[in-house]
């Protein structure tokens, strides 16, 4: 009997202590830490320029985050965030006798270790600290489909592709987190991140395409290739997160 009670007591003690130490969070956020510089480098006008006169369009620009945290002390924790973002811009300009269809895509991966101080106030926990975000940016790819019509019949269409090399973005950020404890296991939180960032983007810009006349021979458009690079230090916009944490 004593042995059974001891095992139950040790299990309860272990799980209670673990609940105070570990947390795993899932959140969704904007891409505030990198939006400003990516838009400026990869879009000649602005991010939604092709949608200004579009008859329809769609913009996807979110980041999904997985964060683990460990309490070194009651008011001190270390954290690691891994984030994945998809940047996709689609638009259509359908004005007879021409039709344009644009599609841009790019991905990013973030790794961000951090350390923070916490203060508990009833069911609210306030957290603030310093993080080191490191982003790997994929190549930027754009596809353009263009068609010309005469009496609702296609006379020719063209397919163009443009690509630019990706790169790295890294820096030092501060963050503030407000968490509301639902129960021992779950809590909701919101978090804001901003700071000094450094971008190293690009290498080559490449553009090529093919024109397909109706009943004629396809013609290759001239290939364009030149250097396009950027090294820039900047103060980032705010990344805003909203998520849920499971405590162990």
Image: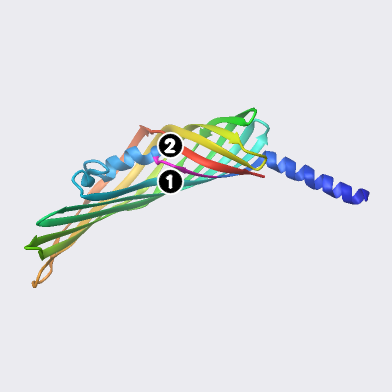
Give, as a single range, the part of the protein colored magenta: 26-31
- Element on which disc 1 rests: strand
Q: How many marks?
A: 2
Using the rendered view, name the quadrant where residue 69 is placed.
top right
Say left or right for 225 vs 133.
left
Say left or right for 47 vs 136.
left
Circle number at residue 161: none
- Element on which disc 2 rests: strand
Image point (10%, 60%), residue name: 148
Q: CA distance from mark 2 to mark 1?
A: 10 Å
Residue 50 in the image: state x and y as whole percent: 21, 47
Dot 2: within a 10 Å radius of its alpha carbon, few (fewer than 14), some, or many (20 or more) residues? some
Contact? badges 2 and 1 (CB < 8 Å): yes
Residue placed under numbered mark 1 in the picture:
63
Circle number at residue 239: 2
Image point (55%, 42%), residue name: 244
């Amino acid at each position: 009997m004593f042995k059974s009670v001891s095992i139950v007591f040790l299990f309860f003690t272990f799980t209670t202590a673990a609940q105070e130490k570990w947390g795993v969070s899932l959140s969704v956020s904007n891409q505030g830490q990198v939006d400003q510089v990516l838009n400026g480098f990869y879009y000649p006008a602005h991010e939604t320029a092709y949608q200004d006169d579009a008859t329809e369009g769609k913009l996807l620009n979110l980041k999904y985050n997985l964060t683990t945290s460990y309490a070194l002390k009651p008011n001190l924790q270390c954290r690691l965030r891994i984030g994945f973002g998809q940047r996709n811009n689609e638009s259509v300009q359908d004005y007879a006798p021409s039709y344009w269809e644009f599609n841009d895509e790019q991905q990013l991966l973030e790794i961000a270790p951090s350390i923070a101080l916490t203060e508990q106030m009833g069911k609210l926990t306030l957290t603030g600290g310093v993080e080191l975000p490191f982003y790997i940016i994929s190549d930027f790819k754009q596809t353009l489909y263009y068609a010309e019509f005469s009496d609702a019949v296609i006379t020719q269409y063209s397919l163009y592709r443009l690509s630019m090399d990706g790169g790295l973005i890294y820096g030092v950020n501060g963050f503030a987190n407000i968490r509301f404890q639902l129960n021992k296991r779950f809590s909701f939180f919101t978090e804001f991140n901003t700071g000094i960032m450094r971008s190293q983007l690009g290498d080559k810009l490449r553009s090529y395409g093919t024109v397909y006349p109706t009943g004629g021979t396809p013609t290759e458009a001239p290939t364009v290739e030149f250097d396009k690079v950027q090294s820039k230090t900047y103060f980032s916009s705010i990344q805003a997160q909203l998520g849920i944490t499971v405590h162990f």
